[in-house]
Image (spheres, rainbow, N blue to C red):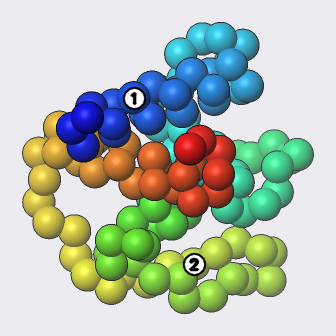
Amino acid sequence: MSRDQKLKERWELIVSKLSHQFAEGDVIDLDAIIYLIGVQELGQLHRDFKKEQKVDLMHIAICKLLTPYGYYELDFVDSDGWPHYKVKSQLPHLKAGEQSVLMKEAIVNYFLEIEFIE
């Protein structure tokens, strides 16, 4: 099986599992998955977030997802438990489709690492 096909199958499995768990079967999108990863990484699962905090959660997720690629590094966790990252390497300029593939690959790797999927 090709690498692209395996990525596609794993991505579809993640979307299916998260949609069932968090969206009552409605199909969850990439941004919602990134948000959920941010909430998971913050570790404050049972609270409401303001709009600005939701954007911050997505930033946390993106940094966490791209850390293994060498783009970010955890710098510190503040007194409220929010992780802060520093840029290690600038992201290359990618077309929208390339960005989407990179994020999907990073998300698949994240969920493999935490053993949400195999």
Depth order, front residue of 74/17: 17
Task: Please give the name of the residue rendered at 45% of the width and 25% of the height, measured from the top-left corner.
Answer: 12
Q: Nearer the viewer, residue 4 or 49?
A: 4
Q: How many marks?
A: 2
Identify the disc placed on residue 67: none
Q: Identify which residue is drawn at 46% across, 49% down.
A: 107
Q: What type is the residue that disc 2 sits on?
A: His
Whether 52 is drawn above or below 73: the answer is above
Secondary structure of residue under mark 1:
helix
Disc 2 or disc 1, which is closer to the eye? 1
Element marked by disc 2: strand
Foreground of the two, 117 or 96:
117
| Residue located farthest toward the top when viewing the structure as drawn | 25
Q: Residues within 10 Å of mark 2 (few under 14, many from 20)?
A: some
In the image, residue 109 lies at what x, y percent? 46, 54
Where does the C terminus fall, quadrant-wise?
A: top right
Residue sitting at the far front: 1
Left or right of 40? Residue 100 is: left
Of the residues shown, which amino acid type is indicated by label 1? Glu
Residue plotted at (33% across, 71% down): 69
Indicate the position of residue 82 as horizontal and vertical percent values: 70, 72
Give me the disc on residue 9: 1
Q: Position of residue 35 (x, y in %)?
A: 58, 44
Q: Which residue is mark 2?
A: 84
Q: Position of residue 37 (x, y in %)?
A: 60, 50
